[in-house]
Amino acid sequence: MTTAMHVHHTICPLCEATCGLEISAAGRAVTGIRGAVADVFSHGYICPKGYGLKELDADPDRLRTPMIRRGSEWHAATWDEAFAEIAVHLPAIRAEHGNDAVAAFLGNPNVHDLDLQLYAPVLLRALRTRNIYSASTLDQMPKQVAAGYMFGGTLTVPIPDVDRTDYFLILGANPLVSNGSLMTAPDMRRRLRAIKARGGQIVVIDPRRTRTAEEATAHHFIRPGTDALFLFALVHTLFAEDLTRPGALAEHLNGIDDVAAAARDFAPETVAAQCGIPAATIRQIARDLAHAEHAAVYGRIGTCTQEFGTLASWLVDVLNALTGNLDRPGGAMFPKAAAGAYNASGVPGRGKGFRLGKLTSRVRGLPQVMGEFPAATLADEILTPGVGQIRALITIAGNPALSAPNGDRLATALAQLDFMVSVDCYLNETTRYAHVILPPPTPLERSHYDLAFAQLAIRNVARYAPAVFPLATGQMSEWAVLLRLAGIVMGQGPAGDVAAFDDLVARQMVEREVATEGSRVAGRAADALLESLAPRRGPERLIDFLLRVGPYGDAFGGNPGGLTLAALEAAPNGIDLGPLQPRIPEVLRTPSGKVELAPEPILADVSRLRTVLDRPTPEMVLIGRRELRSNNSWMHNLPALMKGPDGCTLLVHPTDAARLGLTDGALARITSAAGSVAAPVQVTDAIMPGVVSLPHGWGHRQPGTRQSVAQHHAGVSANRLVPDDAVEPLSGNAIQNAVPVQVTVAEYVIS
Ligand SMILES: Nc1nc2c(c(=O)[nH]1)N[C@H]1C(S)=C(S)[C@@H](COP(=O)(O)OP(=O)(O)OC[C@H]3O[C@@H](n4cnc5c(=O)[nH]c(N)nc54)[C@H](O)[C@@H]3O)O[C@H]1N2
Ligand SMILES: Nc1nc2c(c(=O)[nH]1)N[C@H]1C(S)=C(S)[C@@H](COP(=O)(O)OP(=O)(O)OC[C@H]3O[C@@H](n4cnc5c(=O)[nH]c(N)nc54)[C@H](O)[C@@H]3O)O[C@H]1N2
Ligand code: SF4
Ligand SMILES: [Mo]
């Protein structure tokens, strides 16, 4: 008997490029994976990680049943047993110590997973805790804060219109390896080559000559952490040389004069030494930027996870605005997502704007940003006794023991929790501290729609993919897992009625929308709308609703022929909604209805930047990097991705290597204020002198984990070196780049 072959469409959930894929399968077995050529967005592109879905799906170490830990022993459990265990502990801790005693940490895959996007917020609301943490404060929070202040929405982030630009200034990003971030764009290599083919320029500012830098027309080393100085010098030059041309945008901008005043102290000649870029080069870049017909300035991880992340993120868009490139084709533009976009709902053009949360963290008094406290203070909140101390933690798709600063201290903290639950597919460096692990289905057993990344994409598209395979026997869908957890928290016991809870979630979403001023279904009867969503349930019901009330939606009859989930189901390669269009002022949600070019809280941070102008430079600083065949801390258990030389090496410039007595392949010891690790050296002139680079997400040789392949490619965790005692003050973001370190020859190995 032969098993019938099928080709299924899916969307890769592994990175922001969101490639459409075709999965060939014989029964339940994946036989092949390729880029979907007909996909309206990715047109057949795929990277090595996309193929990795096959091994991820089949990985024997991937958890397939809930796990309960007793002491150091793990036992496979049924779902009922696992929820019963949670129901014994979690409500009791809340009852005795209060709601804030239970914290949640949400990791990166939350934004790549429709179930988690839609249902993790339900669990968080049920927890009624102030202690919410996520990978956002290890990543892009500065950009979100800057966008919040400037445009009124934390996902109203200008995205480089790469396909129409002819001057692309890239800072602290390596999209040829990361496949793009806060810029959802599959196949960056082709897009960058197209810029050059049309005679354009790509200028990369990075302490490392990355693959992206190699593809660029120019690359300049910058001393880590000095981007805000460099960007201010560009702004300074634009004003000093009368090169500002906001054009039609001018009437929508508040605060140009304040920006000019703030930039006054940062002449290229003033910042050149700190940045390591000659003043003449800075001036030339400013002139080229100003004179380019279409230019886009773009900054990513390198400009966010650093001491001046919000200033740098803000200045990127100040430059886009001053040169008239904000919101115009070929510049930096605002996507209009089909579902769930705050900047496409409610009353256009005006809103409440962005403010920090009212609370400050208990131990260090750090601000609450977007309902979260900094991940860098999670350990403090667990380790410091007192009222409000965290005693229990739920992690959802996160590995903070490797991803957060001072990972060793956080691990110590996790070990002391009274109770910990992890929703995760692996027994890894974080989940080994859990008492119960609840595994999600594989990405091929769940449906997909990119709620977040459609808001960051270089083209407006809407794509939905149903699950490739049905849920494995005994597997629960992730949204149901979250609702059962939420049910336990809300006192419904271990066997809450998921269907009834889901009805309530849908009803609340609909009722909120019909009560929203400016909604396309404002004032409509919630019951009637809910009826038209039947018989869908779970994420499909919610996404259908979000699509239908969205800017292209059918508005439940208000816009006949408009978008629905059914329309997407009928178009497996997606629906193209066209190139990005100018959206100012409609996209804005600031109280003034203008772009706030000089938000007061951001300007107030400029004096801190001024103080570094004459600060001595550390002899050696550490930065991170990403590797093509890796995904933060978690795809290291897939043999096909781990082939070839180990990725966790320390990049050292030849002059530094000579001075320090380090040779290629030798072991170096790297020591910082937080800790010390040993890693093999890779001598290369692709790194700036005075800078070393170690990727994060490694360090897998830890007892009690279950990742047999990863253990053989263990590496060391860069976050053992990153201190957790300072955060970027405006966003609470971790400062993972430009960490002062000493590097020596390793005498012996303690990894
Ligand atoms: N030094 C340094 N540190 C960094 C960075 C850096 O550049 N330098 N980068 C930071 C950045 S940008 C980020 S985003 C963070 C990431 O930080 P985290 O989100 O904490 O780490 P990940 O490695 O992405 O871990 C993802 C976890 O989710 C699990 N998982 C995978 N798929 C699923 C799923 O479908 N469902 C569930 N429930 N679980 C799943 C994996 O097993 C893993 O445990 O790291 C940050 N840390
Ligand atoms: N293959 C792969 N792809 C990934 C990931 C992965 O782990 N592997 N992770 C995903 C995630 S979670 C994210 S957030 C994105 C990130 O996407 P990117 O931001 O494109 O990722 P990186 O490759 O870390 O690029 C950051 C660059 O900043 C540089 N840099 C470091 N410090 C500074 C500085 O102070 N100033 C400047 N100007 N540059 C600096 C580094 O040398 C590096 O080249 O990638 C995503 N895609
Ligand atoms: S680029 Fe990203 S989305 Fe595309 S196949 Fe690779 S991992 Fe998946
Ligand atoms: Mo990230």
Image (cartoon, rainbow, N blue to C red):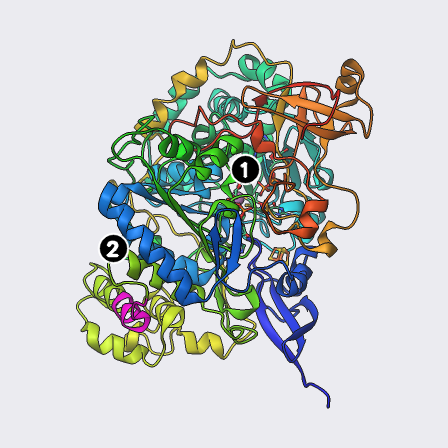
* Residue 545 vertical placement versus 241 (above, below): below
Task: Look at the image and tell me whether residue 124 can be seen.
Answer: no
Query: Residue 301 — which label?
Result: 1
Apparent side of residue 384 relative to residue 744 in the rendered image (left or right)? left
Asked if the residues shown at circle 2 and circle 1 are in contact, with their CB atoms under 8 angstroms apart, the answer is no
Place of residue 222 in the rendered image (x, y in percent of width and height, measured from the top left): 62, 25
Place of residue 586 in the rendered image (x, y in percent of width and height, measured from the top left): 32, 52
Residue type indicated by callout 2: Val
| Residue at screen point 20% across, 58% down | 517
Query: Residue 347 — which label?
Result: 2
Place of residue 39 in the rendered image (x, y in percent of width and height, measured from the top left): 60, 68
Q: Is residue 551 magenta?
A: no
Quadrant containing the N terminus in the rendered view:
bottom right
Q: Identify which residue, 83 or 559, lies in the foreground.
A: 83
Tell me the chief SS of the magenta region.
helix
Q: Secondary structure at mark 2?
A: loop
Q: Quadrant of residue 596?
A: top left
| Residue at screen point 33% across, 51% down | 89
* Residue 246 vertical placement versus 564 (above, below): above
Q: Counting residues from the N terminus, which is met first, the one under dot 2 or under dot 1?
A: 1
Q: Identify which residue, 24 or 670, lies in the foreground.
A: 670
Q: Which contiguous range is marked in magenta? A: 495-505
Q: Secondary structure at mark 1?
A: helix
